[in-house]
Image: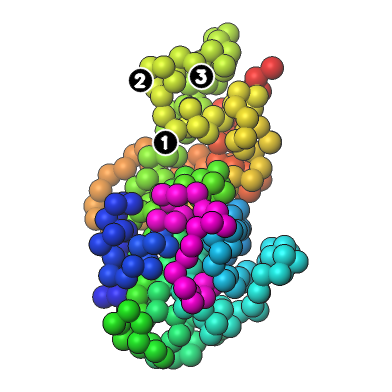
């Protein structure tokens, strides 16, 4: 199979190509800047310019890569074209001009369409220009395997790095919009498990803050206590869900511009489905999925998932 699962940052050096190692580490180990020198003559295509993808693409551009972008949202593409960045009307057109293609998409269905749809990356049949595909979407394992088979059945127009067939990396990311913007994302192969734990921890922290407020304890005081004791976690010290406690996080801007609740609900569904397939019981995941689905049904699906503090627990802003 042509798919590689990226377990952590350090083993990336074991990837079969120097560029794939350099490329992923440039996202997650170092902050990209114009002074970073990318490998020569690598044309990079980027598909999916949402909250995460647009920032990832920007970092590649800042690093000096020649980037071509595509998104179904024309407004998103316009922001790049106005800066002189080449845009294409379909994934197929991106593939025709790229050596490496990165995809950052919201669902398995979107990924399948971008790769194997009528105007997908693999439309040209068995002979492709891109030698490396990097899918940073959070999707189910079955879809990743389907993509692996599809890519494995292709060959390269030109031999690259002693390879005659293209490679696809299964490389979902963690760190959210803040890390995407700063170039400090973590690439992994266990995103479903990571987001399961993240959802449950956000619910626990939010529940604790809301209870504390009901007992007359301010969120600022609780934050100091949490972060200097055993309750400390990413949801309390980096991504605090209480408006007015922390600057620069979605809760400080009405829960806009973060990781959408509908995407968290989708990831939790992937987790519960995967658990069912192997006969694993996951009661907390099931409960978390129900809570985030309720948020979506109430019209909060596009808000950052930390909005569970306000819209499920009825937590109050810090004054």
Residue on which the image places disc 2: 230
Residue 30 spot, x, y in % from top left: 45, 49
Q: Is residue 224 magenta?
A: no
Q: Disc 3 on helix, strand or loop?
A: helix
The reply to whether residue 214 is in sight is no
Q: Is residue 12 shown left or right of residue 74? A: left
Q: Which label is found at residue 200? A: 1
For residue 302, say whether it is visible: yes
What is the span of residues highlighted in magenta in the rendered image?
Answer: 25-45
Q: Is residue 166 left or right of residue 255?
A: left
Q: Is residue 11 above or below residue 221?
A: below
Question: Please, is residue 67 above or below residue 178 in the view?
Answer: below
Instruction: Measure the C-alpha gap from mark 1 to mark 3.
Output: 18 Å
- Density class for disc 1 (Cα within 10 Å; few <14, some 14-19, many ≥20) is some
Whole-percent x, y for residue 156 in the image: 38, 87
Q: Residue at x 50, y 32 (%)?
A: 238
Mark 2 in CB contact with mark 3 (< 8 angstroms): no
The kind of secondary structure element at disc 1 is: helix
Quickly name the residue at label 3.
223
Image coordinates of residue 303 in percent, x first then y, are: 63, 44
258 or 17, nearer to the observer: 17
Residue at x-position 58% and y-position 83% = 93
Cα separation, mark 2 vs mark 3, equals 12 Å
Q: Residue at x 38, y 68 (%)?
A: 19
Considering the whole magenta stretch, tell me its main secondary structure.
Answer: loop
């Amino acid at each position: 199979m042509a798919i590689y699962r990226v377990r952590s940052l350090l083993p990336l050096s074991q990837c079969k190509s120097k560029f794939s190692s350099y490329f992923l580490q440039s996202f997650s180990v170092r902050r990209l800047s114009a002074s970073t020198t990318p490998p020569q003559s690598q044309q990079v295509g980027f598909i999916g310019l949402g909250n995460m993808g647009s920032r990832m693409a920007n970092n590649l551009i800042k690093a000096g890569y020649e980037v071509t972008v595509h998104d179904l949202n024309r407004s998103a593409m316009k922001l790049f074209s106005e800066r002189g960045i080449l845009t294409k009307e379909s994934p197929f057109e991106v593939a025709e001009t790229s050596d490496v293609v990165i995809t950052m998409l919201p669902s398995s269905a979107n990924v399948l369409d971008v790769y194997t749809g009528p105007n997908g990356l693999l439309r040209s049949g068995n002979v492709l220009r891109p030698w490396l595909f990097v899918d940073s979407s959070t999707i189910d394992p079955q879809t990743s395997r389907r993509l692996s088979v599809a890519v494995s059945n292709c060959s390269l127009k030109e031999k690259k790095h002693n390879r005659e067939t293209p490679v696809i990396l299964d490389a979902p990311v963690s760190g959210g919009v803040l890390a995407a913007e700063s170039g400090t994302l973590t690439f992994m192969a266990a995103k479903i498990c990571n987001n399961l734990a993240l959802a449950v921890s956000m619910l626990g922290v939010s529940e604790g803050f809301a209870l504390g407020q009901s007992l007359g304890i301010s969120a600022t005081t609780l934050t100091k206590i949490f972060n200097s004791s055993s309750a400390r976690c990413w949801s309390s010290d980096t991504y605090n869900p209480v408006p007015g406690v922390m600057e620069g996080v979605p809760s400080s801007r009405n829960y806009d511009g973060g990781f959408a609740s509908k995407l968290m609900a989708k990831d939790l569904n992937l987790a519960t489905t995967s658990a069912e397939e192997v006969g694993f019981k996951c009661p907390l995941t099931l409960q978390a999925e129900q809570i985030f689905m309720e948020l979506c049904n109430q019209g909060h699906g596009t808000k950052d998932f930390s909005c569970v503090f306000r819209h499920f627990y009825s937590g109050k802003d810090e004054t």
